[in-house]
Amino acid sequence: MRNCFAKVMNSGLVWLLLSVVVIVIDRGSKVWMLDHLQIGEPVALLPILNLTLAYNTGAAFSFLNSASGWQHFLLGGLALVVTIFIISWLASLKRNQYWQNIALSLIAAGALGNAWDRILYGHVIDFVNFHLNSWHFAIFNLADSAICVGAFMLIVMWMFQQHK
């Protein structure tokens, strides 16, 4: 048992604590938005930022949002498969491979945060709405942000590795 604990503490799996923190913040923000916002009614925070509650039955940027329901199972299952893959990847990394561990932990947190919504509600809760005048970027949430930041970190890491 002690040997197993030591292996976890020295591997990238210890970074799953970051995933837990991100999931808790994501869930808390979504619950707060559900309690305080009306669907589709923007609340201005900044001249370019609104909080606007929206339900997304599709993938990122509302891709597949108008499908008949099969996407719910596909996207939820995909999130679980990706998370299992990421956990096994983290187990193979050393704890001090910070950049890669953080990136993978963020992606796992985002995937699980949105999968949780799909299981609980049948859709993902989105609320961050950037805009310039009448042009609006897709409405998203903190889990989506975690996935994008993690993916960006991996791309940057791989680009720097290619140059070495």
Image: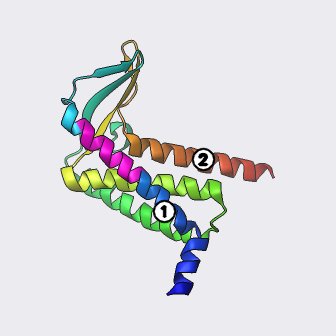
10 Å neighbourhood of mark 2: few (<14), some, or many (≥20)?
A: some
In the drawing, does residue 14 fall left or right of residue 128?
right
Identify the residue under disc 2: 153
Mark closer to the observer (1, 2) = 1
Is 3 located above or below residue 76 in the figure? below
In the drawing, does residue 73 fall left or right of residue 83?
left
Bounds of the magenta segment = 22-33
Identify the residue under disc 1: 16
**Image-quadrant location for residue 100:** bottom right
Quick one: label 1 or label 2, which is nearer the N terminus? 1
Measured from the top left, where is residue 89 in percent x and y?
55, 67
**Image-quadrant location for residue 9:** bottom right
Q: Is residue 28 magenta?
A: yes
In the drawing, does residue 40 fall left or right of residue 164?
left
Q: Secondary structure at mark 1?
A: helix
Is 136 located above or below residue 106 in the figure? above
- Mark 2: amino acid: Met
Label pair 1/2, CB-CB below 8 angstroms: no
Q: Secondary structure at mark 2?
A: helix
